[in-house]
Image (cartoon, grey):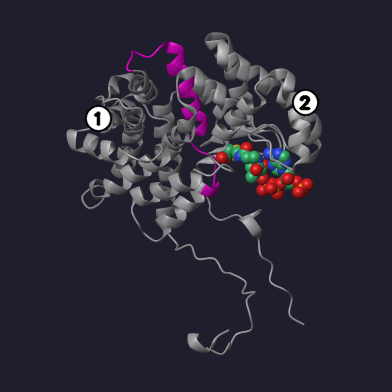
Amino acid sequence: METPLKVYKGLEGIYVLDSSLSFIDTENGKLYYVGYDVEELVARSNYEEVAYLLLNHKLPTMSEFSAFLGKLRDEMRLGEEELEVVRFVSKRSGGMDALAAYFIMTQKDAVGEVSPMDSAVRAVGKAGSVLGNVIRVQRGDDTLNPDPSLGIAGNLVYLITSEKPQPYQVEFLDDILILHAEHGVPASTFGSVVTASTLSNVYSSIVTGIMTLKGPLHGGAAEAAYQQFLEIGDPDRVESWLERALSERRRIMGFGHRVYKIYDPRAKVVKAMAAKASEIAGGHVKNLYEIALRLEEAALAKLAPKGLFPNLDFWTPMVYTAVGIPPNYFTAVFAVSRIVGWVAHLLEYWKDNRLIRPLHNYVGPPVGQKYVPIEARH
Ligand code: CMC
C-alpha cells in the first residue's frame, strides 16, 4: 500500500533556503542580524547602518558608510515626476496599496541599466519619502519635498507632521525601523523570494512583499491590536472583554507567533519603548498603554501555557501613535522598514537562484470525468 503524501500546511517546520541575514534563537528569545544582537543594534546603531549590514552582510567602515549614505540620500529625493506618481497612487487607496502601486508604476526606473543592488538601495531610499507623501495627499495636503539630511526616520516624521521632528520621534521611529527590518522568511519575505525566483525584478518582488505583509495575521496585526485596545476602551474593561473574546474564539491581536513560543525579543524592546511613549505623550497613548499592560497580564494567564506571548505588534501601536503615525498607516511603516529585508533576501537568493515550484497533492474528483455540453447539464 502506498504511504499517503504528507502535506506541510503553512510550510510549518520546513526550511526553504539558506540565509546569512538573521538568526532567530527561539530557545533563548534572541534575534540577530548577520550575527549582531538586534537589541544592541537598537541601542547603538541606526536604520541606515542596519540597511548597509543587511545588504552587504557586514558593518560598514566610516568611508563605506558615508558613500552608502550619499547614495541613499540621493534616492530619498523625489523629483516632480515621482511626486506626480505619488499624487496619482494616493487618490483612492490606503497606504499599503499606494506604496505597492508606486513601485509598480516606477518599475521601469529599476530595471535595465540599474543593477539589482542599486535598485535595492533606490527602493530603500524612496520608500519613506513615498509613504510620507502618500499620507499627506490622502489627508488632503500637498506633497512636500523630502529632507534627506534628516535620515529615513526623521524625514518620514517631517513629511507626516510638516515640522522639524523631535529627537524622541526620530529615536522611536528609527528603533522601530531597525526592529522590523528583517526576520527570516515570514509570508511576505517568502512571497518576495518566490517572485524573485522567477527572475522578475527587484521592484516586483517588493510589490509581492507589500501585498503579503498587508494581512492582519502578518503586518496588519499592529493596526488590529490598536483597534482592539480602542474596542476595550478602558483598562477596567480588560478582563470582561478578554473573557468574552476568548469564549467567542477570537484571536488576541498582537499575541502568538509561528516561530516564537516564548516572549518575542522584539516585543521586549518595544514594550519598554511603549512605556516611555506613554510617559512622553500621555493622554490617549497612556490610556492605550494601560489597556495593553492589563491585557498582557490577563491574556498571559490564559495563553502562555499554550505558548502564546505578545509579539512586537502588541506594543508598537503606542509607539507609532506617540510618533504621530495614524493607525491606518502602521502596516505601511512596517513595509518601509522591511523592504530592506526583502531585497537583501532576494539579492542573496539570486546568487544561486532556483525557481520555487512546490508540489500539490491532488484531492479532486477521479480523473477522466466526462465532459457534458452545457445545454445537456442539469
Ligand atoms: N489569540 C488567541 N488564540 C490564539 C492566538 C491568539 N492571538 N494565536 C493562536 N491562537 C491559538 C489558536 O486558536 C490555536 O488554538 P487551538 O489549538 O485551541 O485551536 C493555537 O493557538 C495555535 O494556533 P495556530 O493558528 O495554529 O498558530 P499559528 O502558528 O498558525 O499562528 C499567528 C501564528 C501569528 C497567525 C497567530 O498567533 C495569530 O493569529 N496571532 C494574532 C495575529 C498577530 O498578532 N500576528 C502578528 C504576528 S508577528 C508580526 C509579524 O511577523 O507579522
Crowding at mark 2 (Cα within 10 Å: few <14, some 14-19, many 20+): some
Indicate yes or no whether the magenta region holds residue 186. Answer: yes
Q: Nearer the viewer, residue 212 or 97?
A: 97
The residue pinned by badge 2 equals 239
Residue 351 visible within the image: no
Camera-nearest residue between 184 and 294: 294
Nearest the viewer among 57 and 289 is 289
Mark 1 = which residue?
Answer: 77
Q: Quadrant of the N terminus?
A: bottom right
Residue 119 point in image, percent of width and height: 30, 44
Q: Is residue 323 left or right of residue 104?
A: right
Q: Give SS at disc 1.
A: loop
- Magenta-span inclusion, residue 177: yes
Q: Is residue 68 left or right of residue 294?
A: left
Which region shows up in magenta?
A: 162-187
Residue pushed farthest left? 80
**Ligand 1 is in which quadrant of the figure?**
top right
Q: Position of residue 101 (x, y in %)?
A: 34, 45
Q: Percent from the top left, x then y, of residue 283?
A: 56, 11
> Hey, which quadrant is residue 102 in on the image?
top left
Q: Using residue 304 as the reference point, say whether residue 130 is left or right of it.
A: left
Q: How far apart, in angstroms, are the residues tagged by discs 1 and 2?
A: 48 Å
In this rendering, the answer to whether 88 lies above or below 348 is above
Total residue callouts: 2
Of the residues under marks 1 and 2, which one precedes in the sequence?
1
- Which residue is painted at 51% across and 25% down in the image? 41
